[in-house]
Image: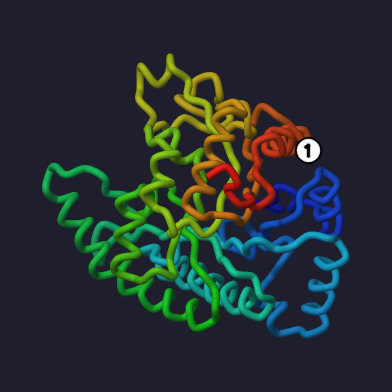
Amino acid sequence: MKIGCFSVLFGNKSLKEALKLIKNIGCEMVEIGTGNYPGNAHCNPKVLLNNSNALEEFKKTIKDSGLEISAFSCHGNPVHPNKKIAQDHSETHRLTVELASKLGVPVVVGFSGCPGANKDATVPSWNIIAWPPDYLESLKWQWNEVLIPFWQKEAEFAEANNVKIAFELHPGFCVYNTTTMLKIREYCGKNIGANFDPSHLFWQSMDPLKMIRSLKDAIFHVHAKDCKIDEINTALNGCNDSTPYGDEINRSWIFRTVGYGHDVSWWKDFVSQLRLVGYDYVLSIEHEDSLMAMEEGLEKAFSCLKEAIISKKPGELYWA
């Protein structure tokens, strides 16, 4: 395995500067945003696919940095009920797949998206309860009429381009847990898998270690990000929290730098479970800790992961 970093947090710097900072921390790989929610400060597929000089300059900058690209990321909502948003996000996804194929980047990371409650809706509707029955009826329509048809086509397109699609399991979108991840793969094929981010699972009261066993070969890319549950606020309001992210003391949970929600012992178990199911790719640090400066957060995350990671393949079982 290798340690990487999602470069979006250095969006105010040039690509060259961002890569230098990431390399100096000790990372070997970089995940780069290509648009939608992460923005495209370091990589605009529309430009690179239509300007050979810009593409060559991009490739040279990556090569000179000594880093490898682990994934392109274009988290968005390509099935948004607002047709303009859906069109923009789906176009960015397609262009990202094309660019990944051209550059030999194996994975495109994003969200499954979330449609509206019905064909007349104007905003997404995240349906997660079974009663009143309206919610289940709407959920069935979302999957059968929107989500499955859309991602069947996109999965086929990505597979034809030798690129895998990795959904981040995130509340607010239709694919957010083990069951929904396995469901989208059942209907849309094995070229869709997970960008496994434990932070989004902790605050849903899931156990990432057990989920790894269930998802097995469906894990295509991994984010290294931690989460701390506030026991007092959670006891009062649960973990479905709309308190602003900046109001940390009143939130039920906050994102933390690796090691500040769960200690290195947990991260060693995390790495070991990934190895048990055959994952041997990247742990891409995503810094969203509002209590810690970016570079300090990255350094601390890297230090924790460096102790936890297993970087070499095991030898023969000489004792057995």
Front residue (pair 111, 68) = 68
Residue 105 placement (x, y as % from top left) = 64, 70
The residue where tag 1 is placed is 295
The residue at the far top in this view is: 232
Q: Residues within 10 Å of mark 1 (few under 14, many from 20)?
A: some
Residue lying at 42% horizontally and 54% vertically, measured from the top left: 216
Residue 224 placement (x, y as % from top left) = 60, 43
Front residue (pair 142, 61) = 61
Q: Quadrant of residue 234?
A: top left
Q: In the picture provided, is 135 more to the left or to the right than 190?
A: left
Residue lying at 83% horizontally and 48% vertically, measured from the top left: 21
Q: Amino acid at mark 1?
A: Glu
Q: Is residue 47 above or below residue 226?
A: below
SS category of the residue bearing label 1: helix
Q: How is the image coloured?
A: rainbow
Q: In the picture provided, is 229 more to the left or to the right than 40?
A: left
Residue lying at 32% horizontally and 66% vertically, measured from the top left: 147
Q: In the picture provided, is 286 more to the left or to the right than 179?
A: right
